[in-house]
Image: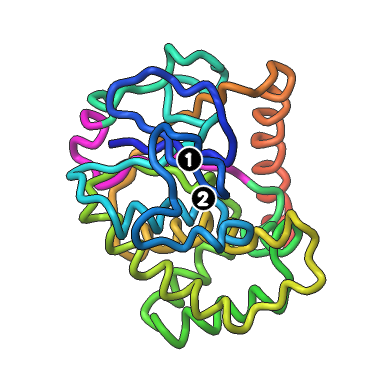
Amino acid sequence: MIYIVSHKQFNCPKLKGYIPIYVGGAYAGEGVSDAAGDNIAHKNANFCELTALYWLWKNVDDEYIGLVHYRRYFGKSNFSRSVKDIYTYNELINKLQGHDIVLPYVECFKQSAKEECILNSCSSQNFKSLRDVVQRLYPEYVNDFDCFFAQNKSVLFNMFFCKKSVIDGYCKWLFDILFELEKVADLSDCDAYRQRLYGFLSERLLNVWVKHNGLSAVNLSVVNTEISTADMFAIYRRRITNNICFNIKRIMR
């Protein structure tokens, strides 16, 4: 099953194998709620769609599992808003042939992934605390952690499709780290956006986990059903410009 995470009511695509999962108390009688069963729904303000991911980890036993968003879906083009361009469940199964996991396209930053993270979503101290937690709990991941954050590319959005047995391993690792970080992270000076810290960090940590475990990923376009045409092309131009700027900086060092 592919779960469409949302914090509000939305026009759910009528696609076989897709079901809404509501977070943040938005459930209104359709799909499922992240507040049922074994859950961390009360953490949604800081963990974002991870409250849905935790719920899936603990409460479902689907052979294949996916997580997408009320406005973002795996699809045939980054320049599409059309539901017709969203991949069906069976098409995503086919995309997995010869691969371990389906992920979104790779984003390029103007800065290193570490610099981008600190600039947009995480204080320097909280980033240091994150690395300290990884080093203490999973020291074998530190080299891959450092390598990922030193370069300028990342998969984002906390979206995936794979066998549930694959994502179960990721969830154990991820929530071990984030729950430990939660004990020492300081969000007192963060605005509402930056208080979504754990959701932002998990977007980056998924890359570390995939890299360390040598998983074969297929990267797909993302259909955004709510984006404007102007924003589509602005994002595309930014990705190209950012990669050029990063490589120029690297050459000049």
Vertical placement of residue 144 versus 6, above or below: below
**Which amino acid, by three-letter code, is at mark 2?**
Glu
Of labels 1 and 2, earlier in sequence is: 1
Q: Exactly how many numbered labels are in the figure?
A: 2
Residue 55 location (% of width, % of height): 38, 55
Front-lying residue, 198 or 231:
198
Packing grade of label 1 (10 A; few <14, some 14-19, many >=20) is many
Vertical placement of residue 233 versus 149, above or below: above
Vertical placement of residue 126 versus 36, above or below: below
Residue 1 location (% of width, % of height): 27, 36
Range of the magenta residues? Answer: 93-108
- Are discs 1 and 2 less than 8 Å apart at CB? yes
Label 2, secondary structure: give it.
loop
Front-lying residue, 116 or 152:
116
Task: Say which residue appears at 36% left-offset and 32% top-offset.
Answer: 19
Task: Say which residue appears at 70% left-offset and 42% top-offset.
Answer: 242
Label 1, secondary structure: give it.
strand
State the CA–CA distance, disc 1 to disc 2. Answer: 7 Å
Residue extending farthest front: 29
Residue 154 belongs to magenta span: no
Residue marked by disc 1 = 5
Vertical placement of residue 186 versus 100, above or below: below
Residue marked by disc 2 = 49
Residue 105 belongs to magenta span: yes
